[in-house]
Image: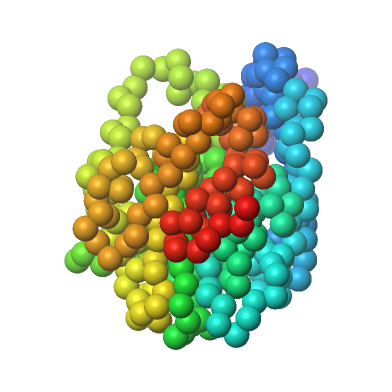
């Protein structure tokens, strides 16, 4: 006797589920094979840890929890490049050990990314800490944080009123620029797909900077594709081997207009808070070859003081490689070492009319 199913849809459903399962297994196998190939082909690969008192979300996307510490370590090919502890003060800023300042002390407020925060060096070796040593009678504060872009500086100054406690005080407000800040500000596909957290989304509207939320709000479908699908090695393999029209690069003029306007608004807010505070853009040595000169040219006739240090290390005997860690898989030079920060801080002290220590 032949058995006839009374529910043919059950067989169809099982066939569909089996197809999905087989497809998932094939995709998983291909992804695993590609990851293994990459792992075997990069013996000099970079590994890192960044953990501790982190708080995701809020206006900035990521910040240190007040009164906690972060551990940041990086290895390359099995070699330990650094294993540093970053201590946060009661406001979440990186602690800046400094000699007690007098009642007439000037303020030195530093904003930016890991080049300001000082990833890889001790609390007393960061740019703000070394500036405090060379300048003397300074209250230095470090508002920088790893993976920040210019948008965090604008939000801290213009929206979160970070300068308010220094109303009426004299001193400097320093934003440190590197080339990578442009794609972070624009939110290029490479940044959106690889960043450790969702960056804030700013736009220019009628000549003014406006805060729209986060890049995840700009185009949610595209964001989830870039964030989760494009992160797969298999997806990148297909992108690299299937002919397609490349995405147009961001307009250089529009990018410079955007960043220039953002920095001008920071300078305006600084002057509004205290006429004795000077807003400065510090172009970090060896780290702004693509955009630094054009940015300096854009800002030269503005109220912003530009400290163009791109060639500060060029005359150094033995080259510049030893002034940077080898912790970047893309660029020749990685994050600055303690010696690099000391050289920049010494020059900054001289350029801001403060005598550098011997």
Q: Residue at x 46, y 39 (%)?
A: 312
* Residue that protrudes farthest toward the front in the picture: 358
State the image quarter where residue 92 is shown.
Answer: bottom right
In-image side of 222 versus 81 (left or right):
left
Q: Residue at x 72, y 57 (%)?
A: 123
Residue 330's x, y, as percent?
54, 28
Q: Answer whether residue 99 is visible to the viewer in this image.
A: yes
Rendered position, 204 above or below 290: below
State the image quarter where residue 195 is shown.
Answer: top right
Q: Residue at x 53, y 67 (%)?
A: 109
Which one is nearer the viewer's eye here, 29 or 326?
326
Which one is nearer the viewer's eye here, 277 or 81?
277
Residue 46's x, y, as percent?
69, 29
Q: How many labels were placed on the picture?
A: 0
In-image side of 107 versus 182 (left or right):
right
Residue 208's x, y, as percent?
26, 67
Quarter of the picture containing the N terminus is top right
Q: Residue at x 78, y 53 (%)?
A: 85
Residue 323's x, y, as percent?
61, 35
Which of the colour schemes (rainbow, by chain, secondary structure, one colour) is used? rainbow
Rendered position, 133 above or below 292: below
């Amino acid at each position: 006797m032949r058995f006839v199913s009374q529910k043919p849809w059950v067989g169809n459903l099982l066939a569909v589920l089996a197809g999905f399962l087989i497809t998932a297994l094939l995709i998983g196998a291909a992804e695993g094979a590609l990851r293994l190939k990459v792992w075997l082909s990069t013996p000099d690969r970079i590994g890192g840890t960044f953990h501790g008192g982190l708080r995701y979300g809020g206006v900035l996307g990521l910040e240190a929890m007040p009164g906690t510490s972060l551990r940041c370590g990086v290895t390359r090919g099995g070699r330990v490049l650094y294993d540093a502890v970053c201590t946060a003060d009661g406001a979440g800023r990186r602690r800046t050990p400094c000699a007690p300042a007098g009642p007439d002390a000037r303020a030195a407020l530093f904003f930016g990314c890991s080049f300001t925060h000082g990833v890889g060096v001790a609390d007393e070796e960061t740019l703000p800490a070394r500036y405090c040593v060379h300048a003397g009678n300074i209250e230095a504060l470090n508002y920088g944080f790893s993976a920040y872009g210019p948008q965090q500086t604008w939000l801290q100054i213009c929206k979160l009123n970070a300068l308010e406690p220094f109303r009426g005080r004299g001193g400097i407000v320093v934003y440190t620029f590197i080339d990578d800040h442009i794609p972070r500000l624009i939110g290029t596909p490479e940044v959106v797909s690889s960043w450790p957290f969702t960056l804030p989304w700013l736009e220019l509207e009628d000549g003014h900077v406006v805060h729209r939320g986060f890049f995840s709000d700009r185009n949610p479908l595209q964001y989830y594709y870039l964030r989760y699908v494009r992160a797969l090695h298999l997806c990148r393999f297909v992108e690299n081997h299937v002919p397609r029209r490349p995405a147009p690069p961001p307009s250089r003029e529009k990018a410079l207009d955007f960043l220039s306007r953002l920095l001008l608004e920071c300078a305006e807010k600084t002057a509004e808070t205290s006429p004795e505070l000077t807003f400065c853009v510090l172009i970090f040595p060896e780290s702004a070859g693509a955009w630094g000169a054009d940015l300096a040219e854009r800002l030269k006739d503005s109220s912003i003081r530009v400290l163009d240090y791109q060639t500060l290390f060029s005359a150094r005997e033995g080259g510049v490689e030893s002034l940077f860690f080898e912790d970047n898989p893309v660029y020749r030079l990685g994050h600055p070492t303690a010696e690099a920060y000391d050289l920049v801080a010494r020059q900054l002290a001289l350029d801001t009319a403060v005598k550098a220590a011997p």
